[in-house]
Image (cartoon, rainbow, N blue to C red):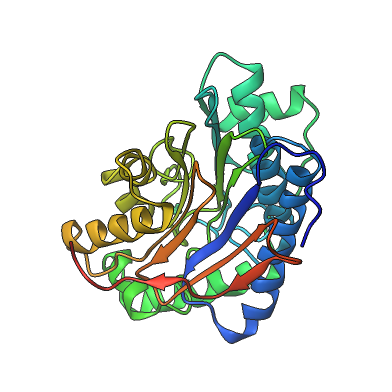
Amino acid sequence: MVSEGKLKGRPVIVVHGGAGTWQPERSRSGLAGVKRAAEVGFRVLIRGGSALDAVEEAVGVMEDDGSFNAGYGSSLTIDKRVEMEASIMDGETLQAGAAGLLKDVRNPVRLARLVMEKTDHVFVVGEGAEKIAQIFGLEKRNPISELRLGYWKRQMETLNKGKFPLPKLAELAKAHPDIFSLETVGAVALDAEGNVAAATSTGGFPLKLPGRIGDSPLIGCGTYADNSCGACSATGVGEIAIRLVLAKTVCDYMARGKTAQKAVETAIRLVNTRILNNYSSMGLIAVDMKGNIGAAHNSPNLCWAYMSTELTEPRASLTAKKITEKL
Ligand code: GLY
């Protein structure tokens, strides 16, 4: 049991390191990474820190890890570059910030927070976003890792075997889930003051076209938080989360009285019902205002962890509730 000290409420944090297929060679580092992220985020909460600080710190840990498709170790675009994106949202004020098309900002989630707090905007991309990072002294880091370069080569070989012009990337990803996993990272938290927050960060879909923006930096799609219901972070095929405004949809389910778990399960059923693509891999985490947590996916795996005052250390797993049914 973690000491709650003089805290008003019982804080809780849930993090994800991505939906998809987690191969054995990276499972151990993925699980260790989400555990560490949950631990770091929870430490913020247990010291009386805000949910907003907790999700930023937790996502920052995963961006630095190298095991995940976010920050260092991001997936490469079809032309062998990295374009990262992230968002963060405060459920108390509904303030939100997001940044995209980032080449070398070490922690995109910290830039999202700066956009939220230091500008009048919600979403800034490319050179403009990198300028904000520079003005506020954010660290830079080359995000291209050996691991992702190796994946990129295998992905390009697979793509080329399918002969250019490429068959749809989704079909390739379905046929080769081992090399097209998404592994976006995210966190949701409820703090002792009763405020929720959410954050999400990603390198995006492997072999994406330059300039493609996914769900992760889009408020309501990959990230949403509102003290009137709860918070949610999504992982998986961004185009699906965008079309279903998935993170907000989960929050709407909670607003109508569903627990966090029922809300994410219903949203995955919605994906299974409405999205007819042959590649609809999605994962969702959520927390409601009572501190109930939720995690569900239709992909083979969801790498995730959570930590609360009832536990002595974070619990991590490569699966949550897998949902294959429709609505
Ligand atoms: N969910 C991450 C992406 O599609 O970019």
* Residue 53 in the image, given as x and y percentages of width and height: 70, 37
Q: Quadrant of residue 257?
A: top left
Residue 309 in view of the camera:
yes
Image position of 47 with respect to 92: above or below? below
Give the left or right position of residue 114, taking residue 261 as reference: right
Residue at 81% of width from left, 53% of height from top? Answer: 3
* Residue 320 in the image, given as x and y percentages of width and height: 47, 71
Q: Quadrant of residue 76?
A: bottom right
* Residue 57 in the image, given as x and y percentages of width and height: 72, 45
Image position of 293 with respect to 5: above or below? below
Image position of 136 with respect to 20: above or below? above
User: Of residues 251 and 26, which is closer to you in this image?
Assistant: 251
Residue at 70% of width from left, 74% of height from top? Answer: 29
Q: Split into 4 quadrants, where in the image is the C terminus?
A: bottom left
Tell how many labels. 0
User: Of residues 33 and 190, which is closer to you in this image?
Assistant: 190
Residue 237 in view of the camera:
no
Q: Split into 4 quadrants, where in the image is the N terminus?
A: bottom right
User: Of residues 153 and 254, which is closer to you in this image?
Assistant: 254
Image position of 279 with respect to 239: above or below? below
Q: Residue furthest top?
A: 120
Residue at 69% of width from left, 70% of height from top? Answer: 146
Give the left or right position of residue 102, taking residue 272 as reference: right
* Residue 243 in the image, given as x and y percentages of width and height: 26, 45
Give the left or right position of residue 148, taking residue 241 as reference: right
Q: Residue furthest bottom?
A: 24
